[in-house]
């Protein structure tokens, strides 16, 4: 039997999914997409999972689309190839990016090595990106005549502003993890020796928090983009009203009053 393309490991309430095609820097094939989609679907409904970590096996995080994939078959007629690539993105990358953005629990991208092309977009779409100091981010698309996809055009200017988004995407230059943290592209860059332990501690810390509220925080921040300030205030009021009736809020307040550690259970 061939080895899994996505390794799944549950430790306490932290689920780690590891992209597992290290020989090709964990670049995406349709088969790896399918295994990742199945693993994420299972995590969505498994109430024992309270934090998700996405990482890569070997020396890379993910090098984006596998360029040996048949969708890059140059023998296809232009129309057929265009339709095939667009369909592939709609069928595989869009649902993946949306799914990560809509997970009912916080999602950490543990960027262990290079994240390139759609691999960078997928990492940057996660809630908290923690990268090893030796890792890097490459907007590789321009080097092969494409635009950023898997959410890159939406994410990059929001994370680092238009000037840096265009600089990174047009040059396709490698951005070291340390610089990525400095410009606000990612949450944290940590020494390689501390990487695994830092990710583990962060994931366990998030898993012990009111995760439904954390997922609602992500959604509220994303949804606030196109709203006016007044609309955002009203949206916050609506969401706050809903959360205020949930057990996690009641537990948090009760624990604060009793000066004890809260035990959260919502998802
Ligand atoms: O068709 C559609 O669906 C369109 C969608 C596009 C979405 C995208 O993601 S487009 C962007 C695709 N990705 C890239 O263009 C990145 C290509 N890779 C690289 O530029 C370099 O590999 C890196 C800069 C990421 C790392 O360089 P380096 O020197 O550390 O490693 P390497 O030697 O280039 O790669 C190691 C192996 O991984 C190598 O295989 P080999 O020679 O040892 O057998 C290499 O071919 C393989 N590999 C790396 N990236 C990919 C890949 N194989 C297939 N597809 C890849 N994307």
Image (cartoon, rainbow, N blue to C red):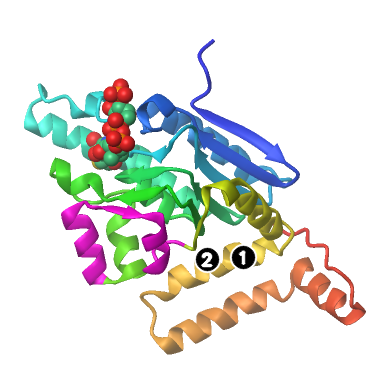
Residue 41 image offset from top left, x and y in percent: 56, 40
Q: Is residue 70 visible?
A: yes
Taking the image as four quarters, which one is ligand 1 found in?
top left
Q: Relative to the observer, which residue lies in front, 158 or 71?
A: 158
Determine the image quadrant of residue 151: bottom left
For the record, the magenta segment spans 162-186
SS for callout 1: helix
* Residue 56 falls left or right of residue 30: right
Tell me which residue sits at (60%, 55%) in the image.
104
Residue 139 image offset from top left, x and y in percent: 26, 50
Residue that numbered label 2 is attached to:
218
Q: Quadrant of the N terminus?
A: top right
Residue 224 image offset from top left, x and y in percent: 44, 75
Q: Is residue 29 visible?
A: no
* Residue 267 falls left or right of residue 147: right
CB-based contact (under 8 Å), mark 2 and mark 1: yes
Q: Quadrant of the C terminus?
A: bottom right
């Amino acid at each position: 039997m061939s080895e899994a393309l996505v390794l799944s490991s549950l430790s306490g309430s932290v689920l780690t999914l590891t992209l597992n095609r290290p020989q090709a820097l964990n670049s995406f094939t349709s088969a790896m997409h399918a295994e990742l989609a199945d693993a994420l679907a299972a995590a969505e409904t498994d109430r024992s999972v309270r934090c998700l970590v996405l990482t890569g096996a070997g020396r890379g995080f993910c090098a984006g689309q596998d360029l040996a994939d048949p969708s890059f078959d140059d023998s296809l007629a232009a129309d057929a190839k265009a339709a095939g690539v667009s369909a592939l993105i709609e069928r595989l990358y869009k649902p993946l990016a949306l799914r990560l953005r809509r997970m009912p629990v916080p999602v950490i991208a543990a960027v262990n090595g290079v994240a390139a092309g759609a691999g960078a977009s997928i990492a940057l779409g996660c809630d908290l990106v923690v990268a090893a100091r030796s890792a890097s981010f490459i907007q590789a698309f321009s080097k092969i005549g494409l635009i950023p996809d898997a959410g890159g055009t939406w994410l990059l200017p929001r994370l680092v502003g238009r000037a840096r988004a265009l600089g990174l995407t047009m040059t396709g230059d490698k951005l070291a993890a340390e610089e990525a943290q400095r410009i606000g592209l990612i949450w944290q860059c940590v020494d390689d020796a501390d990487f695994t332990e830092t990710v583990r501690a962060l994931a366990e810390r998030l898993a012990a928090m009111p995760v439904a509220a954390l997922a609602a925080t992500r959604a509220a921040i994303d949804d606030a983009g196109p709203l006016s300030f007044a609309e955002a205030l009203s949206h916050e009021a609506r969401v706050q009203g809903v959360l205020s009736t949930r057990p996690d809020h009641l537990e948090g307040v009760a624990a604060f009053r009793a000066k004890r550690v809260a035990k959260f259970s919502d998802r």
